[in-house]
């Protein structure tokens, strides 16, 4: 994952297209594990099963760009404005909360549909792809007990693959000088939506090796993503 993403990030000019492509590579890797895992038949995850959509989610800047790009393709300008307002309101409520308090807040993801289905399922984050359960009741019980996620069995291969893909993607982003880190979902998507609105035309005269790094370093993107809240844990803070 690291090698594939780094090759893309270093070879393409401009800032946003390499981020989108690196996220696509990561998603493809996790999708292969999702389809090929021998534990796939045991997964209880289905459309409308949304207990995990009340939990803290962290994403890389590349994933945030993927999600923002998908929203722009999916929604009309008026619809996108409404979605952005909803994301902003949810970010104000939960982006600063540690994992445990996020579960207690009982605030659904801003992109969860009224029918309990994910409205961005096709381009959802790596963490959401990797988090599964063999028992939907266990997920519901965890939510009702205000616990941050079920503690029952899940698809271990898919979980490990999603985590490794995220780590490899982040390592490539850092090595290429691109925005990196694990940002709170809602805050990062807001940054990405704003970036897509202001992206200048791609430069064609820069060196393929050095253009992305120099453009990223000179842009506001790294600072904007660096200012996003990070998902933290009270248990880890105290321990």
Image (tube, rainbow, N blue to C red):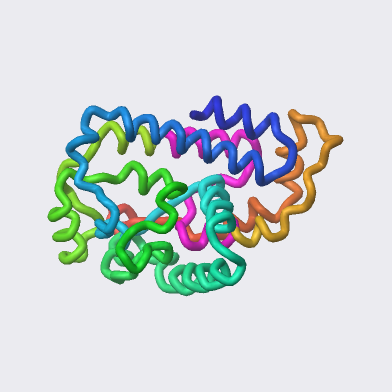
Q: Is residue 163 left or right of residue 100?
A: right
Specify start and end residues of the magenta stretch as a single range.
164-192
Q: Name the residue: 82% across, 42% down.
A: 203
Q: Name the residue: 30% across, 71% down.
A: 105
Magenta part mainly helix, strand or loop? helix
Residue 146 falls in image quadrant? bottom left
* Res. 43 visible in picture: yes
Question: What is the x, y in percent for residue 97?
Answer: 38, 66
Q: Name the residue: 72% across, 38% down.
A: 212
Q: Is 172 included in the stretch rendered in magenta?
A: yes
- Residue at the extreme right of the image, as rendered: 205
Residue 106 falls in image quadrant? bottom left
Whether residue 228 is situated above or below residue 169 in the rendered picture = below
- Of residue 10 and residue 132, the one placed in the foreground of this image is 132
Q: Name the residue: 74% across, 29% down.
A: 209
- Of residue 158 and residue 178, the one placed in the foreground of this image is 158
Question: What is the x, y in percent for residue 37?
Answer: 27, 29
């Amino acid at each position: 994952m690291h090698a594939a993403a780094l090759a893309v990030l270093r070879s393409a000019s401009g800032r946003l297209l390499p981020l989108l492509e690196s996220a696509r590579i990561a998603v493809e890797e996790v999708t292969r594990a999702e389809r090929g895992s021998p534990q796939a038949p045991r997964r209880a995850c289905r459309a409308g099963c949304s207990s995990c959509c009340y939990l803290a989610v962290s994403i890389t800047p590349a994933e945030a760009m993927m999600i923002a790009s998908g929203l722009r393709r999916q929604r009309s300008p008026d619809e996108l404005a409404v979605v952005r307002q909803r994301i902003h309101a949810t970010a104000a409520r939960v982006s600063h909360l540690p994992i445990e308090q996020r579960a207690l807040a009982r605030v659904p993801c801003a992109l969860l549909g009224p029918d309990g289905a994910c409205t961005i399922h096709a381009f959802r984050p790596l963490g959401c792809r990797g988090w599964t359960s063999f028992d939907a009741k266990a997920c519901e019980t965890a939510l009702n007990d205000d616990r941050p996620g079920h503690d029952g069995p899940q698809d271990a291969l898919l979980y490990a693959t999603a985590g490794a893909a995220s780590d490899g993607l982040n390592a490539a982003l850092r090595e290429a000088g691109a925005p990196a880190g694990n940002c709170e979902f809602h805050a990062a998507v807001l940054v990405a939506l704003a970036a897509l609105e202001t992206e200048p035309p791609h430069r064609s005269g820069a060196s393929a090796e050095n253009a992305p790094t120099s453009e990223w370093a000179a842009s506001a993107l790294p600072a904007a993503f660096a200012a996003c809240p990070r998902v933290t844990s009270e248990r880890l803070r105290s321990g």
